[in-house]
Image (cartoon, rainbow, N blue to C red):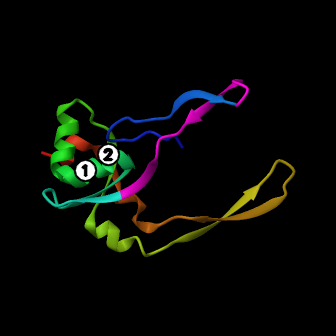
């Protein structure tokens, strides 16, 4: 999973660990990225986005809709997950499926997979189609 903010493009930087003896070894400075569900009241939709905490603070200050419009105006228009309200209600319903596998020697094995029924209702769309 890449740790890149979908709204600002913020990502990890590289630098040096410097010891007391001034010896330098390479290291990474990761961005503080979290996955959040955000409600956009003007469009009446929920979006699921990987966002940096700095962008979340700016979003709280400016308002969700204004921040997203500003990012689109800057030319940053990422793909995000848009959750339908009906799909959010159905997300509590769970589904499991049993699969049978047969290898080259004829040995059978079974696996159980988890498939939520409402997974097809979530769709990946461009941010500019949500914010009009």
Figure quadrant of residue 20: top right
* Residue 33 part of the magenta-drawn span: yes
Q: Is residue 129 left or right of residue 80?
A: left
**Nearer to us in this view, 119 or 37:** 37
Q: Residues within 10 Å of mark 1 (few under 14, many from 20)?
A: some
**Nearer to us in this view, 126 or 42:** 42
Q: Is residue 98 above or below residue 49?
A: below
Image quarter hosting the N terminus: top right
* Residue 121 image offset from top left, x and y in percent: 34, 60
Q: Is residue 27 above or below residue 65?
A: above
Secondary element under disc 1, as helix, strand or loop, is helix
Q: Residues within 10 Å of mark 2 (few under 14, many from 20)?
A: some
Figure quadrant of residue 96: bottom right
- Can residue 83 be seen in the rendering of this structure? yes
Q: Is residue 89 left or right of residue 25?
A: left
| Residue that extends furthest to the right in the rendered view of this protein | 105
Reading the image, the residue beneath label 2 is: 55
- Can residue 124 be seen in the rendering of this structure? no
* Residue 13 image offset from top left, x and y in percent: 51, 30
Check whether the beta carbons of the residues at disc 2 and disc 1 lie within 8 A of each other: yes
Image quarter hosting the C terminus: top left
* Residue 78 image offset from top left, x and y in percent: 32, 38
* Residue 40 part of the magenta-drawn span: no
* Range covered by the magenta-colored residues: 20-36
Q: Is residue 21 above or below residue 59?
A: above
Figure quadrant of residue 93: bottom left
Q: Which mark is residue 59?
A: 1
Secondary element under disc 2, as helix, strand or loop, is helix
């Amino acid at each position: 999973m890449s740790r890149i903010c979908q709204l600002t493009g913020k990502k990890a930087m590289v630098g040096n660990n410097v010891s007391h003896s001034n010896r330098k070894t390479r290291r990474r400075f990761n961005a503080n990225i979290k996955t959040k569900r955000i409600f956009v009241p003007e469009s009446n939709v929920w979006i699921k986005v990987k966002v940096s905490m700095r962008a979340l603070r700016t979003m709280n200050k400016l308002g969700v809709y204004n921040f997203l419009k500003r990012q689109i105006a800057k030319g940053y228009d990422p793909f995000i997950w848009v959750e339908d309200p009906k799909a959010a209600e159905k997300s509590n319903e769970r589904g499991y499926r049993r699969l049978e596998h047969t290898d080259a020697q004829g040995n059978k094995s079974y696996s159980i997979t988890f498939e939520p029924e409402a997974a097809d209702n979530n769709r990946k769309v461009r941010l500019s189609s949500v914010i009009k």
